[in-house]
Image (cartoon, rainbow, N blue to C red):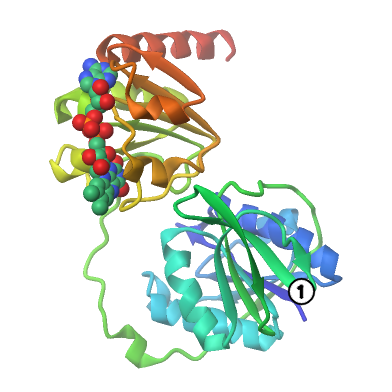
Amino acid sequence: MSLLIYAESAEGKFKKVALELASYAKKVADSLGTQVTAITVNTDNVSELAKYGVSKVLKVSNDKLNNFNAKAYADVIKQAAQKESSKIVLLSSTTDSLYLAPIVAVGLEAGFASNVVSLPVSTSPFQVKRNAFSNKAFNITEINTEIKVLCIAKNSYGVFENAVSISEEAFAPALNDADFDIKVESVEKGSGKVTIADADIVVSGGRGLKGPENWGMLEELASVLGAATACSKPVSDLGWRPHSEHVGQTGKPVATNLYIAVGISGAIQHIAGINSSKVKVVINSDADAPFFKVADYGVVGDAFEILPKLTQKLKEFKAQNA
Ligand SMILES: Cc1cc2nc3c(=O)[nH]c(=O)nc-3n(C[C@H](O)[C@H](O)[C@H](O)COP(=O)(O)OP(=O)(O)OC[C@H]3O[C@@H](n4cnc5c(N)ncnc54)[C@H](O)[C@@H]3O)c2cc1C
């Protein structure tokens, strides 16, 4: 009875969430006296997973799976869980995995919990702590089915090394042609150098930046910090920034170590999507902006004056500490 994780990768490299998931799984597996098996899709080099506690990898290599396909990927994970007799199947909380996990759970007749934010509260009965109401509250969910599928919230556990020896096995699940009825014609990537999903730091701009022509100073700050850029909903609705950068309740969720909000008022729909971030810095010219209520650090002032100075200071700091 192993514990199965779906280790997400992009362009042949594991995402940080996959390493966090492996770290989490290793801790749970140790407490249950079992080991961690990972399922990977079209990832050649999987040895990195050993560093984070994965003992076995089922490697799926199939050109049909080059583009994400929820039905087919869910079927692959389901077949891997059945092959390994896995009673616990863990996925990340990326857009792809949140899409997959309920389909996997239905296929395995498993109980499903999303937004899990800590190690299981108890394994018998099986209880997990979850974020609820757009991260404003927690609940304890008990799962009584034999198989359990969980999505672990990003940055809720951390990445910890716990090296083990690893075995690799080629796995060729049966693919159902009917799952490929939707064809991906082309894939366009977001413009940012670092994606929001993988970023440790996100620098986000709102309508306070007045127009798309002013995003250069935000991008410069992001580049100095190695951060991803993001924006509020109206900014992407106005076409100032691509929709891939829209964060919030109806956009991408953000759970970074540092979230810097510039010229964003802090409407509840925006906060709902970003308040799992560990440290929130708010720059706003209105001292009464609601965002300051949830900020860890706040700067009241004009973004057009503050951003260039902040970027300059960070450049100097980096140069001194290079
Ligand atoms: C169903 C629904 C879903 C929604 N989902 C989302 C979502 O997912 N994400 C999201 O972001 N919004 C969402 N919204 C919209 C949300 O309610 C707000 O309207 C939106 O977040 C406001 O965007 P903003 O803060 O960029 O703009 P504004 O509210 O216009 O705020 C601009 C801010 O910039 C400040 N400012 C102005 N000039 C400067 C300056 N020179 N320097 C510094 N600060 C300055 C102002 O003081 C103000 O606080 C949703 C709304 C609805 C109804």
Task: Determine if residue 136 is in view.
Answer: yes
Q: Position of residue 70 (x, y in %)?
A: 40, 75
Tell which quarter ligand 1 is in: top left
Task: Determine if residue 243 is in view.
Answer: no
Q: Position of residue 111 (x, y in %)?
A: 59, 79
Q: Quadrant of residue 180?
A: bottom left
* Front in this rendered view, residue 239 or 285: 285
Q: Is residue 246 above or below residue 126?
A: above
Q: Quadrant of residue 207?
A: top left
* Residue at the spot 70% in from the left edge and 57% down from the top edge: 24
* Residue at the spot 51% in from the left edge and 25% down from the top edge: 296
* Front in this rendered view, residue 207 or 36: 207
Q: Is residue 138 above or below residue 4?
A: above
State left or right for residue 261 relative to residue 53: left
Q: Is residue 81 above or below residue 188?
A: below
Amino acid of disc 1: Pro
* Residue at the spot 46% in from the left edge and 73% down from the top edge: 100
Q: Which residue is mark 1?
A: 125
